[in-house]
Image: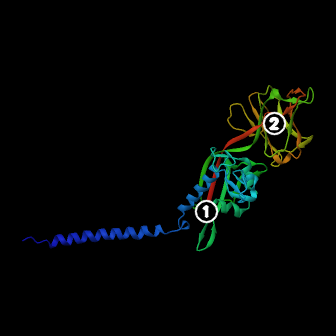
Amino acid sequence: MKDESGQIAIDFLAGLALFLIALTFTVQFVPGLFSTISSSDEDLSIISYRTATILSEDPGWWDEKSGVPNSTGTDWEDHTDHVFRLGFAEDSSHQSRTTNKPNILNYSKIESTKGLNEDEIITMLGLFDNINGARIEYEYNISILQNGIPVRIGNQTATFGTQSPSRDNVFQTKRLVLVEKGEIANFSADDLKAFSSNDDMAILNITGTIEKNIIVQISGFNVTNNTSYMNSKLNGDLLIQDSQNYSAYIKKDGSNDFRPYTDPINPNDTLKLVYYQDIFNETHNQLGINFSEMNIAPGPPYIEYADYAKQHYEKAELVVKVWR
């Protein structure tokens, strides 16, 4: 007759070991099923990602909740008292809740967000948690950057929230986007017209209500080594080149990037002048762009900016940071 008592002892120990492993797994795993979003820093990463996705892929929505036809739409930037959902993406149709232009950010939507209060932004983007009935708001920073610097939309920088601290538990998401930076008109230097012969000031007529930055880009210079950009005048008044009026940039021959303007202008260079929208207080404006050693042909007719203008987009990064 066989003695099986040893086998029973081994089976018992194996079963006990499996039970202890299962118990350990349960103790470690089950509490995670019931933890709130505020219990894990990993969830801040999810919130950061979600916020960046909403802003870059959603055009937003407004709703008067009146039931009246055309009392809703994605053009919330024109109805900031009734914003229901926040988003920066270009509209496909004002009556559609979606867009076929994700990651293309609208100038007016970004600018209008500056007019919203902090509580509205936090609520619409879900940058808060409810813990035991108390609203706990997350700290955040939302910026649209080029070369690490916030882009200019009108006379303001495209940054929202507070400056992020220098510590590890700040969670961020980056999205590559195209951001609308205003209207641009591209000219060849040969298109420019001056008031008279031997006059080095090109004249542009700008009419209508100006709601975006005006960008003038000039290339095709037939010039000498002494040619340079001097200054700009608006309706006869000299404009100071600063953060309130305008900025001047140049892309040198062989370069892919615009840099702050420096003399001289060479034949294959491109000059870019960015005039900020708030300087245009009239509906009929005359912009003078003054050069030296330029030999501009006399007008009339003078250039009408609107005949050349189109929406202008540039590559940028949408960066969303969230922390406690």
Mark 2 vs mark 1, foreground winner is 2
The image quadrant of residue 212 is top right
Residue 323 — which label?
1
29 left or right of 152 in image: left
How many C-alpha atoms fall within 10 Å of the one at disc 1: few (<14), some, or many (≥20)? many
Q: Quadrant of residue 12?
A: bottom left
Secondary structure at numbered mark 1: strand
Hey, which residue is sitting farthest left in the picture?
1
Q: CA distance from mark 2 to mark 1?
A: 45 Å
Q: Residue at x 29, y 69 (%)?
A: 17
Visible residue check, residue 157: no
Query: Residue 169, can we see it?
Result: yes
Q: Quadrant of the C terminus?
A: bottom right
22 vs 116: above or below: below
- The vertical placement of 5 against 238, above or below, is below
Mark number, residue 306: 2
Q: Which circle marks residue 79 in the picture?
A: none
